Each structure stands twice: as C-alpha cells, then as structure tokens.
Image: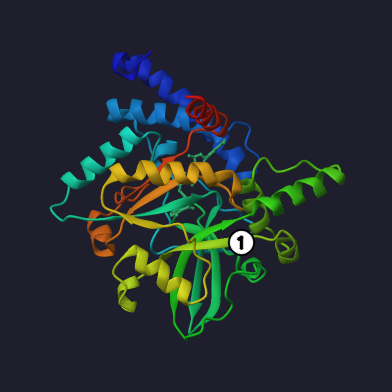
Amino acid sequence: PEVSSLTLAAATTEAAALRTQLNQWRREYYTEDAPSVTDAEYDQQYQRLLAIEGRFPALVVPDSPTQQVGDVVSPDFTKVPHPVPMLSMGDVFSLDELADFDARLRKTTTTDFDYNVELKIDGLSLSLVYTDGHLTQASTRGNGRIGEDVTANARQIADIPQELPRPLSLEVRGECYMPKAAFAQLNADREAQGLDGFANPRNAAAGSLRQLDPRVTQRRQLATFMYTLMDADQFGVARQNEAIQFMADLGFATNPSSEVHHDVSTLADYIDRYTAQRDSLSYGIDGIVLKVNDLALQQELGNTVKVPRWEIAYKFPPEEAATIVRDIEWTV
Ligand code: NAD
C-alpha cells in the first residue's frame, strides 16, 4: 500500500519489520562484508522506511537505520575518535528527485551557489592524518564518531603519500576502493583456493583494508581517491573544487571527473556521460555526488544526525536496468 494510505497501527508494524530486516542486512554488509541482497534491494526498503518515518515522525527511534551511520567498529582494531563525524549521505534515484533537492536547498539560503559534481566511488571512507608532513594516522569511518585505526594498512597502499612535499599538518578524507582488475584477480585466486569470493569490489575493499595483517592489505592492491580537505580555510581554500586541486598538488590521488555546475538541469548530460563510461572505468561507481561548492556555505547549511544537508548522491539504476534503458534508447 501507498505510505499515504497507511494507518498508524499498520505503519508501526511495518516500520518495526523494516528496521529488523534492514539491521540484519547491515550486519551482513558492514560486519561480515558479505551482503545477502543487492544494494538496490536494500535501498528500496530503506526508502520505504524513510517515507513511513517521514509521515509518522513519532515512529523514529534511535536504533533505526535511518538514524545511524552504518559501519561497525570491530573490537580487533584500536578505536579512533572523529572529532568531526564522518557521515553518510542522502540519496535520490531520479532527476526529478534531484531537482526537488536543489529547489528545497535553494529555499533555505539567500546565497546563490554552484555545485561541485563528483563521481560516487564504490568503496569505503578513509581518513588520513598528517603531522608536519608525515602520515601519522589512518582510520575508517566506523560508526561515524569512532572509527578503526588502519594506519599500518594504509602504509601498504601504493597511492597514499607517506610524506607530503611540504611539512603540513592536516586531515584529508576520501574513498578507499579496489580497482576492478584487482577484484577480478582476487576472486579468481580465492576460487582457486576453494574460498568464497567477495560479493562486489566495495566489500572486497572493506575486507582488505580492515585486516589485522598489513601484508594482506598490501597484496590486495587497494587504491584511493581523496575528496575532503578538513579545515580547508587554514590553507586559504574556499571551494570544494579548489580543495581537490590542493590535495592533488600535495600528491594525493584525486578523481579527475569532477565539474562545477550551477543548475541541476545540466546534470542529465553528466550522468549520461558517466553512465556510458561506467563499464570502462577501472573502478566502480554507483552514482554521482552533488556538493555545494562554497565550503563556508556548507558549514552554514550543516548536517542532520546522519547526513550533510549540502550534499546528495544520485544513485544509478541497478546495472541490469541501466542496460535495458540504454538498449531502448539505441533502438529508438
Ligand atoms: P553511501 O555509501 O550510499 O554514501 C556515503 C558514502 O559515499 C560516503 O561515506 C563516502 O564513503 C562515499 N563516497 C563515494 N564517493 C564520494 C564522493 N565523491 N564524495 C563524498 N563521498 C563519497 O552511504 P552509506 O551510509 O555508507 O551506505 C549506505 C549504502 O550502502 C546503501 O545505500 C546501500 O547501497 C549500501 N548497503 C547495502 C547493504 C546490502 O545488504 N546490500 C546493506 C547496507 C548498506
């Protein structure tokens, strides 16, 4: 039934069932790095729960998946607090929803703004801290406020600079991912050894970064794209696209595909271009991310408990569906 026609009693029962189901899927995905359903199936149920909670706000409880940043903090790792939380991200699934997000956001501020549009890399978040130019700490997102110390493992990832060209103290955040070729090789090797393969490159990346033996991480050939410069203003950096350039100049791996757009109406073309290139990229992407480009305005717009208000992910349709859409377009 439509969420708008649910009674409170029916909504209460359904929300409880959805929480139980989603929390089980989250355990499989985040704790065991072994999802039993596709992201699209997970997203669909998650959106249903969001819609029910949106109509009946009294049903929101702290242990709802809509209130929590997903990943777990394994007791096997030293805990690392994140003074500035590492959050999740809101998502939309159509251009209409993207236009609605833009319209709502523009109503909340009198300042005109651009978006920096980036690819949404299918990996897991990673924070890197440098002290006087030396890499001193790497950590996972964990539950957003407390992550896992993976410093020894990050030292084994080839594209992470161990030293910066200048003696700067800073934190950058970004995505750690497994390139498609490394993923195919890893699963082939595991199959040959009679082991289960990883479900997808994201789970393989998570399972490879969160390793107690850094030599295993080294063999897994992980890679990174950094996209967040913390406290950027202390370096005179005022915009997200400049932050990416600043990090690139320091030797970090950054993704070359980001673009500044003012209007969401021009994004259909960006999405089409990267949908078409998706299979030929050497890394997985599951959508695009729009971020308010002005970093001071980002601060002003702030965050909810779970997601920044100044950014949104547009998720690609599941791969099968995307192929069908393209086939239809080609035959027209
Ligand atoms: P998310 O992965 O959808 O989005 C937030 C994350 O995107 C950030 O933390 C960051 O790591 C990443 N990201 C990639 N490129 C980025 C860029 N350019 N800029 C900023 N961030 C970028 O949200 P989430 O809360 O980490 O995970 C929820 C998603 O995980 C769900 O939507 C679902 O797809 C998947 N999931 C699947 C299952 C399952 O059982 N299949 C279970 C739980 C979650």
Q: Is residue 184 visible?
A: yes
Circle 1: element type: strand
Give the image location of residue 253, x and y in percent: 53, 67
Q: State the count of labels.
A: 1
Quadrant in the picture for residue 291: bottom left
Q: In the picture shown, does residue 307 fall above or below 56?
A: below
Q: In the picture shown, does residue 43 fall above or below 263?
A: above
- Viewer-nearest residue: 87 or 219: 219
Give the image location of residue 316, x and y in percent: 47, 38
Amino acid type of the residue that numbered disc 1 sits on in the rendered structure: Ala
Q: Is residue 34 left or right of residue 47?
A: right
Colour logic? rainbow
Give the image location of residue 116, x and y in percent: 34, 56
Q: In the picture shown, does residue 97 fall above or below 299?
A: above
Residue at 48% in and 61% down: 256
Residue at the left extreme? Answer: 110
Residue at 60% in and 53% down: 74
Q: Is residue 90 visible?
A: no
Residue at 48% in and 58% down: 146
Q: Is residue 204 left or right of residue 294?
A: right
Quadrant in the picture for residue 170: bottom left
- Viewer-nearest residue: 263 or 142: 263
Tell me the crowding category of disc 1: few under 14, some 14 to 19, or many 20 or more residues within 10 angstroms, Cα based: many
Give the image location of residue 108, x and y in percent: 17, 47
Q: Quadrant of the N terminus?
A: top left
Residue at 47% in and 26% down: 18
- Viewer-nearest residue: 125 or 183: 183
Which residue is label 1 attached to?
223
Residue at the front extreme? Answer: 332
- Mark 1 CB near ligand 1 (8 Å cut): no
Q: In the picture shown, does residue 124 fall above or below 137?
A: above
